Image (cartoon, rainbow, N blue to C red):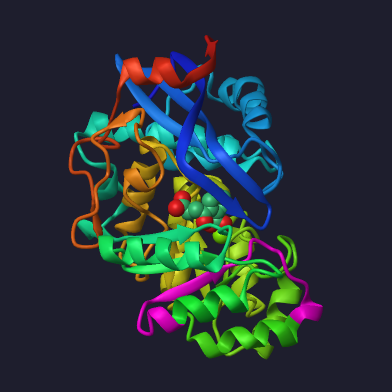
């Protein structure tokens, strides 16, 4: 039984080992909002995947802070929660803001798993003790730099490489990487940079034998993706478009994609991710776990999600050193034969390092009922 007695939000800033460039912008520092909930002498942790600006989705760390402090936590006030799966119905009165909700739900799962003495992966129904690691490679200054970066990741053992693309950075870079690595499992992610009118251009992607094209069109365009899917041989995968389990259902009903990228934060929480998992299994739709440059807390959540049986493709879950030199949680995630091990300790299975947390925190907020 969980009764939230206290909450602290931490806004942290972690310098990335290299700038991460997508079709919607460049990040040199990952700003993340962390949530710590206290119940019965235990602390549960969650991480909000919202970014510093409304580019990937409408939410930002600042809108999430507002939602969590002023609306989500007050709904938990005085409540006894038997099971984190009750959380979506508790916060149902709040429209939208899936990333804010998910951060709080994650902390409840951590508390629950600690109380049960079980790893989060086991509580979710995970069946794997390690998950295949992929790497998402941002837009590079030139093609030579891209090929040498990819070569580095391949040498480290990553099982799949995903290239960020946009108009003007697509066919050339793809041809160069495909020529150097004829058999590498390869995909692309456009982060919504194309229009349906680009369908003839996007058809050129078919010759690179890609596992999928991720989110070519804008975030709310399911019908456009359904039309585009008809024109391409390469399977479409949706990311930004899938903001709830219901949206996942709509996308599958419309045949707007054949593969789903699951991000618990974007979907509104771990319960929502479990719902999408059940739906996808029923329909035999392959899943993989996406990433949002998480700290060790969010990475632990992703690894637990990826351990579920319906997750059959390599994930955007890389070793910590691909993102950060230091992290606020330990142990760091390491690549072992192209896989990341699923933590086996109770709860998230990582521990927050207080000294590092302090060092990387730029602001904190305390909440008392
Ligand atoms: O679209 O998948 C995305 C990072 C930030 C925001 C959106 C995306 C990404 C990535 C990186 O592709 C995945 C990772 O964390 O390794
Ligand atoms: Mg994506």
Q: Position of residue 195 (x, y in %)?
A: 78, 72
Q: Quadrant of ligand 2?
A: bottom right
Side of 126 where 344 appears, left or right: left
Above or below, 47 against 35 in this view is below
Total number of numbered discs in the rendering: 0
x, y percent for residue 158 = 31, 63
Depth check: give the residue in front, 54 or 80. Answer: 54
> Quadrant of residue 36 in the image?
top left
Q: Quadrant of the N terminus?
A: top left
Instruction: Quadrant for the C terminus, please.
Output: top right
**Which residues are the magenta region?**
179-198
Q: Residue at x 78, y 77 (%)?
A: 196
The residue at 38%/36% (across/down) is: 297
Q: Residue at coordinates 42% horizontally, 21% vertically from top-left?
A: 37
Is residue 312 located in the magenta-colored stretch of the structure?
Answer: no
Give the quarter of the image for residue 240. bottom right
Whether residue 267 can be seen here? no
| Residue 345 point in image, percent of width and height | 18, 37
């Amino acid at each position: 039984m969980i009764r939230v007695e206290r909450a602290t939000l931490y806004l942290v800033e972690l310098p990335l080992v290299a700038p991460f460039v997508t079709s919607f912008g460049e990040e040199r520092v990952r700003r993340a909002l962390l949530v710590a909930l206290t119940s019965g002498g235990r602390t549960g942790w969650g991480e909000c995947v919202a970014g510093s600006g409304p580019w990937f989705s409408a939410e930002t760390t600042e809108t999430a802070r507002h939602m969590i402090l002023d609306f989500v936590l007050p709904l938990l006030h005085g409540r006894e929660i038997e099971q984190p799966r009750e959380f979506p119905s508790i916060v149902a009165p709040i429209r939208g803001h899936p990333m804010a909700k998910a951060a709080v739900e994650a902390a409840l799962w951590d508390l629950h798993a600690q109380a049960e003495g079980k790893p989060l992966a086991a509580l979710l129904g995970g069946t794997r003790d390690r998950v295949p690691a992929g790497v998402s490679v941002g837009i590079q200054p030139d093609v030579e730099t891209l090929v040498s970066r990819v070569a580095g990741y391949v040498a480290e053992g990553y099982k799949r490489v995903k290239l960020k693309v946009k108009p003007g950075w697509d066919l050339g870079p793809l041809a160069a990487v495909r020529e150097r690595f004829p058999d590498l499992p390869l995909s692309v992610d456009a982060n919504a940079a194309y229009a349906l009118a680009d369908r003839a251009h996007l058809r050129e992607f078919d010759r690179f034998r890609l596992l999928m094209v991720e989110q070519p069109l804008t975030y709310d365009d399911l019908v456009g993706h359904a039309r585009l899917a008809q024109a391409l041989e390469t399977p479409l995968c949706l990311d930004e478009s899938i903001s709830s389990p219901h949206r996942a259902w709509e996308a599958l009903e419309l045949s707007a994609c054949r593969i789903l990228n699951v991000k618990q934060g974007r979907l509104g929480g771990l319960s929502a991710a479990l719902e999408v998992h059940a739906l996808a299994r029923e329909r035999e739709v392959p899943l993989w776990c996406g990433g949002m440059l998480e700290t060790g807390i969010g990475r632990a959540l992703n690894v637990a999600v990826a351990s579920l049986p319906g997750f059959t493709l390599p994930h955007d879950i890389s070793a910590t050193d691909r993102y950060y030199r230091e992290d606020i949680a330990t142990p760091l995630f390491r690549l072992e034969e192209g896989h990341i091990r699923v933590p086996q300790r109770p709860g998230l299975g990582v521990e927050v390092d207080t000294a590092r947390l302090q060092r990387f925190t730029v602001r904190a907020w305390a909440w008392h009922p």
